[in-house]
Amino acid sequence: MRSLTAFLATSATLSVTTALISPDGVGRLPAMGWSSWNEYEDRINETVFIRVAELLNELGLKDRGYEYVNIDDTWSDKENGRDEETKVLIPDAVKFPRGISHLADKVHELGLKLGIYSDAGSTTCGGYEGSLGYEEIDAATFAKWGVDYLKYDNCDVPEEWNDEWRWWPELWYGGPPRENQSEGDPGYTSGLPAPDGYDWATSNTSRRFLAMRDALVKQDRTIQYSICAWGHAHVDQWGGDTGHSWRMWGDIYPIWEGTYTWSWGLMPILNHAAFFTSAGDFWAHNDYDMLEVGNGNLTLEENRSHFALWAALKSPLIIGTPLEGIKPEILDILSNRELIAFNQDTKYGISAIPYKWGTNPDFTWNQTHPAEFYVGPSSKGLHVFVLNSFNKTVKKEVNFAEVPGLKGGRKQKYRVHDMWTGKELGVHKGGITLKLKAHDTAALRITEVNGRHPAPNFKTPRNWGQIPKPSVPKPGRKPSWW
Ligand SMILES: *[C@@H]1O[C@H](CO)[C@@H](O)[C@H](O)[C@H]1NC(C)=O
Ligand SMILES: *[C@@H]1O[C@H](CO)[C@@H](O)[C@H](O)[C@H]1NC(C)=O
Ligand SMILES: *[C@@H]1O[C@H](CO)[C@@H](O)[C@H](O)[C@H]1NC(C)=O
Ligand SMILES: *[C@@H]1O[C@H](CO)[C@@H](O)[C@H](O)[C@H]1NC(C)=O
Ligand SMILES: *[C@@H]1O[C@H](CO)[C@@H](O)[C@H](O)[C@H]1NC(C)=O
Ligand SMILES: *[C@@H]1O[C@H](CO)[C@@H](O)[C@H](O)[C@H]1NC(C)=O
Ligand SMILES: *[C@@H]1O[C@H](CO)[C@@H](O)[C@H](O)[C@H]1NC(C)=O
């Protein structure tokens, strides 16, 4: 019997017209969990995951909705790869002496689900065996082991799977690959944009991820499908048909702005996100990568902004920090009930949308000062998120007249509530001015004075925020690591 059914579901309002719909609501809301990569990279083993599963319980995070314990890259046997005869992937015998299936049992006993990792190429990003060409075998293996979630990465794609046109937003490669060029050649970024109306769902990138989707839906087990295509080939346009979530950009790093080796700070990622908020809904989520809350040198305010904005954007919330000895203030951020409730709302699936860029003119592409004002609905009311992208305290005004879903007029009154503290901020006329510390984000809930929802029919304007054609940035600079 098929336990994961893919079929078309029409959405009246959004650019997402189809979706991967799975039993028991799996993938309907953004995934929540923990992944090994940001903290452990290749230093993983069975003990790590069992301890994390215990800690998710002990710290109350499971009760807040964090349910996936995800094994990231480097779990398989790097030398031997696959069994010579069956071609089944071999787990690393030192890291997982009792196999993945044993770990799945342990994680399930603790009331949680197990995630695993593979790659739509010849090898994974860490150089371990990939799944391209082995989708059926690997999906069956994961199902047999009791795996509940697959993160499917995009490294080491063989040449015969190259795309006819290229859309690599991280580097703004908008044109066709040229025959005499290979990655890294000067001029590689140049080229014409894909023809008008080009259907990116027909790209080879889409086909590589679809092959695994098709293999997963054949299994007698529901496996959440997390596409990690880094925004390539406009995954925002076909990711919803193919998986439950899709990565929109390169890897995240715990810095506010700029890049570190091949990874990116929070502001460049948010800058990209602001243009794609209409791409998601139930069953279909833009993924801005695993949380760095609690990592590196982020300040308390930066930790808060990261969590609030990822929650507001309906990104999966996958913790990437050590849970053992976690600081109380970091646990507080990750446990914030109201932000989680917004992210996991069962009535409104859409992301918050930027309604005003703030510092810069609307739709400005700027990797240090992206859109700062966001609005989105939940069952509880209309929510406004305001980012201070400056590294000093500033005042920011939420003018009700500017907020889609609220009625204008200087005398218009609304009740305002602080989602961070859970405290009422009272009834305000015309708007509210907030004093925001450097790099902090305010998270507000706005209702009618009598507590009623001010905009129960709030919808994302069609194609809201999609990059307008003329302002697609010029091909980007070459990053230092290239
Ligand atoms: C498992 O991995 C952790 C984290 O890297 C390490 O501290 C521990 O020693 C390892 N345990 C075993 C049994 O290898
Ligand atoms: C897919 O790859 C094949 C083989 O390299 C190539 O001929 C074809 O043009 C590609 N198709 C698309 C749609 O990019
Ligand atoms: C590739 O070919 C194009 C046009 O034929 C040429 O302009 C360009 O310089 C070549 N690039 C390299 C890296 O050789
Ligand atoms: C934000 O997280 C990082 C890592 O735990 C931590 O070093 C930093 O202190 C946090 N901010 C605060 C003030 O808690
Ligand atoms: C944090 O700051 C220290 C000291 O300035 C630096 O060595 C380290 O690389 C920084 N970490 C990150 C993740 O940027
Ligand atoms: C980004 O925006 C800030 C604030 O307006 C501005 O000072 C800066 O020059 C912009 N950066 C770029 C690269 O345009
Ligand atoms: C504030 O931001 C500017 C520009 O990004 C940077 O050069 C400066 O070091 C920052 N100051 C602090 C205190 O972080």
Image (cartoon, rainbow, N blue to C red):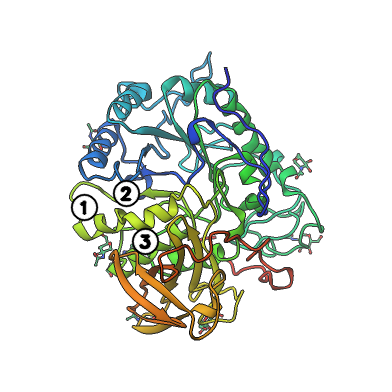
Residue 190 in the image: state x and y as whole percent.
Answer: 72, 64
Assess disc 1: are there few (<14), some (14-19) or many (≥20) residues with their C-alpha within 10 Å of its C-alpha.
few
- Tag nearer the camera, 1 or 3: 1
* Label 3: element kind: loop
Note whether ligand 4 is within 8 Å of mark 1: yes
Above or below: residue 114 compared with residue 88: below
Q: Distance between the Cα atoms at labels 2 and 3?
A: 11 Å
Q: Is residue 434 left or right of residue 349?
A: left
The part of the image, by quadrant, that contains residue 472 is bottom right
The front one of 398 and 475 is 398
Image point (61%, 55%), residue name: 279
The answer to whether one can see residue 191 in this image is yes
Q: What residue is pinned by disc 2?
A: 39
Q: Nearer the viewer, residue 12 or 415?
A: 415
Check disc 3: other Cα within 10 Å, few if <14, some if 14-19, many if 20+.
Answer: many
| Figure quadrant of residue 242 | top right
Kind of residue at badge 2: Glu
Q: Which mark is residue 96?
A: none
* Quadrant (top left/top right/bottom left/bottom right) for the N terminus: top right
Cβ at disc 3 under 8 Å from ligand 5: yes
**Neighbourhood count class around disc 2 (C-alpha, 10 Å): few under 14, some 14–19, many 20 upward:** some
Q: Quadrant of the C terminus?
A: bottom right
Residue bearing mark 3: 254
Secondary structure at badge 2 equals helix
Secondary structure beneath label 1: loop
- The residue that disc 1 covers is 326
What x and y, as percent, mark residue 449?
41, 71
Viewer-proximal residue, 361 or 141? Answer: 361
Instruction: Residue type at mark 1: give it.
Output: Ile
